[in-house]
Amino acid sequence: MRIVPARDGGLCRIRLNGGELSAAQARVVADAARACGSGFIDATNRSNLQIRGVRTGAENQLISRLIEAGLGPATPDSDDVRNLMLSPLAGLDPYAMLDVTPLAGALLDELQCDTRLRALSPKFAMMLDGGERLAMLDHPHDVWFSAVSANQFAFGLGGCPPTLSEHSPALASVESGHVPAVANALLHTFLDLALPEQTRMRELLQTHSAEAVLDHVQGKLHFQLKQNAKDWRRPASNARLRFGVHPQRNQGAVCIGAQIPLGRLDASTLQALADLAPRMRMTPWQSVMLLDVPVAEVESAIERLKALDLATTPNEPFARLIACTGSQGCAKSFSDTKADAHQLASLMPETGNVHLSGCARSCAAAHHVDTTLLAVAPGRYDLYTHAPEPVARHITIEEAARWLARSTTDA
């Protein structure tokens, strides 16, 4: 595990397998954030956590605590390759094609045991989709696998599973039992073909066609890939399903989803979440899904989530706002986006989603958001919608709120 410098102190990313955190692990993270850092923990759009403000001299203590809690990699120096995204409802959704968690475990084992794969960029990412009703389908991944049936997965490179006819189709398909072998062949193919400056699959595809990459992959396999997924389309997912109560495969318990305001928790809030459920999953929307909540305790759990200021319905302002770390924690940010987002929350119209980004890197939102406010100076933003050019420049938060109100009325 690594701790990298940030404006507000060291930053420690905790990569969570499938976004999952047991109640005991959550308590360790909360205690470690207090003892070794600022006491603040960020949820990321890759379903991970970050402890902020790690103090100089406390790094080894922090890492030791996390590893002892089972939050480190299975093998030394393999932490950066554990980038596998699952649905927050993986293995739980009774409507999914299959339970992908055993397959995810096999992929994570391969990622951590194959020493050559440590040459991959820490940003190189895969997705495994079991057809759950709730899934982040907008994040572009270097490699994605999506269930066509319980026995077959479509896969593609440098993008997302297609949901519309105009989207790039799947590259090929593979039997479920062969997914780990194909994933391994794809990753080794990338390392075989990529130039030193090509760290992501989309960059490799600028110099090698997808068909050429697939031919290289096929040469590593003892079975034939299938070319029958060109017309397949993945059913769309409704992000609003990250809120509220959902049935689980196991009877007598449910999942409950809620939005963490601007993706930031304090240690006390994380501790309180650990008291509500035996385990939880962080989501790509920087929200949390409580798992295995007894049906008899649902009402009290929702009331407790509200008391913790988590959004429990999709129409609340903090359910519709995303903000990066901002200038308090990042030297590249032009404004304190967290504070500005809090101000905007009190002025938001009743509909519309807004992303506040401190710079052009757009770290907080890899998916499309209705409106983006891109900071250009403290408290000043350019406003973007669907076009590459801003529809308003150098505006204040109050002016942005008025623009949002007008656009909502016009709509």
Image (spheres, rainbow, N blue to C red):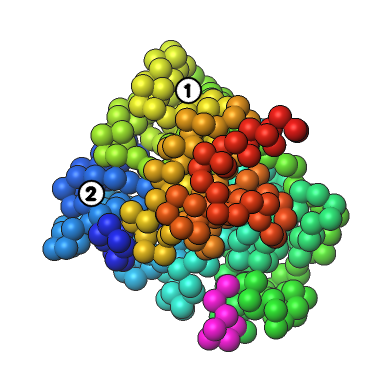
Up the image or down, 6 lies above or below 138; here it is below
Q: CA distance from mark 1 to mark 2?
A: 35 Å
The residue sitting at 68% across, 66% down in the picture is 157
Point out the image quarter for the N terminus.
Answer: bottom left
The residue sitting at 61% across, 61% down in the picture is 141
Residue 90 visible from this viewpoint: no
Q: Which residues are magenta?
A: 194-200
Amino acid on which the number 2 mark rests in the picture: Ser
Residue 349 image position (x, y, % from top left): 59, 29
Residue 305 image position (x, y, % from top left): 40, 24
- Identify the secondary structure beneath mark 1: strand
The residue sitting at 51% across, 31% down in the picture is 347
On screen, residue 391 versus residue 311, left or right, reads right
- In this rendered view, identify the residue nearer to me: 129 or 176: 129
On screen, residue 404 versus residue 66, left or right, reads right
Point out which mark residue 253 bears: 1
**Residue assigned mark 2:** 38
Point out the image quarter for the C terminus.
Answer: top right
Q: Label 1 neighbourhood size at 10 Å, few (<14), some (14-19), many (20+)?
A: some
Up the image or down, 287 lies above or below 195; here it is above
The residue sitting at 72% across, 42% down in the picture is 236
Residue 294: which quarter of the image?
top left
Up the image or down, 208 lies above or below 367; here it is below
Residue 5: which quarter of the image?
bottom left
Amino acid on which the number 1 mark rests in the picture: Ala
Q: Label 2 neighbourhood size at 10 Å, few (<14), some (14-19), many (20+)?
A: some
